[in-house]
Image (cartoon, rainbow, N blue to C red):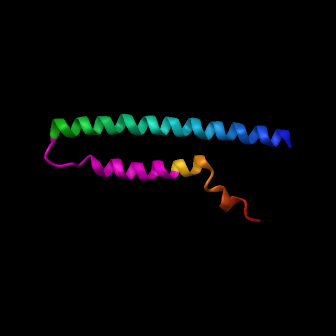
C-alpha cells in the first residue's frame, strides 16, 4: 500500500515537472512571437493563432496533470 502511494507521488511530481517545462516553453515562444509581430507586421495579429492553438494543448496538459483523465482509466 505504501509503495503504491510513493509510486503515485513520484508520478505526480514527474507530470508536474513536465508541465512546468511545457509552460516555460509556451511563455518563451509566445514572447518571441510577439516580438516578431512587433518588428515585422504590427498591423495584423498573426501571432494569436499559434498562441491560442498551443494554449488549448496546454489546457489539456493541465487537465492531465490534475488527474482529470484518470476517470477513463479507472473504469473496469
In the image: residue 45, left or right of residue 23:
left
Tell me what residue is drawn at x 24 percent, y 35 percent. Answer: 35
From the top left corner, tell me how far across and down residue 46 is, in percent.
23, 49
Q: Nearer the viewer, residue 68 or 73?
A: 68
In the rendered structure, does residue 49 fall within the stretch colored magenta? Answer: yes
Q: Residue at the spot x=64%, y=36% of the render?
A: 13
Q: Number of labelled discs?
A: 0
The part of the image, by quadrant, that contains residue 42 is top left
Residue 15 belongs to the span the image colors magenta:
no
Q: Position of residue 34 (x, y in %)?
A: 26, 39
Which residue is depicted at the point 46% across and 39% down?
23
Q: Image point 17% across, 35% down: which residue?
A: 39
Q: Which residues are magenta?
A: 41-60
Give the quarter of the figure containing the N terminus: top right
Q: Residue furthest bottom?
A: 76
Toward the right, the furthest residue is 1
Position of the C terminus, as image quadrant, is bottom right
State the predominant SS element of the stretch in magenta: helix
Q: Is residue 51 above or below residue 36?
A: below
Is 8 situated left or right of 14 in this image? right
> In the rendering, at what x and y percent does residue 49 appear?
30, 52
* 31 lies above or below 52: above
Q: Residue furthest left?
A: 43
Q: Quadrant of residue 14?
A: top right
Amino acid at each position: 500500500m505504501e509503495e503504491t502511494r510513493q509510486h503515485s507521488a513520484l508520478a505526480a511530481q514527474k507530470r508536474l515537472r513536465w508541465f512546468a517545462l511545457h509552460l516555460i516553453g509556451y511563455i518563451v515562444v509566445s514572447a518571441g512571437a510577439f516580438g516578431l509581430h512587433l518588428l515585422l507586421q504590427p498591423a495584423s495579429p498573426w501571432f494569436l493563432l499559434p498562441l491560442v492553438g498551443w494554449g488549448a494543448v496546454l489546457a489539456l496538459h493541465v487537465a492531465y496533470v490534475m488527474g482529470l483523465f484518470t476517470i477513463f482509466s479507472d473504469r473496469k
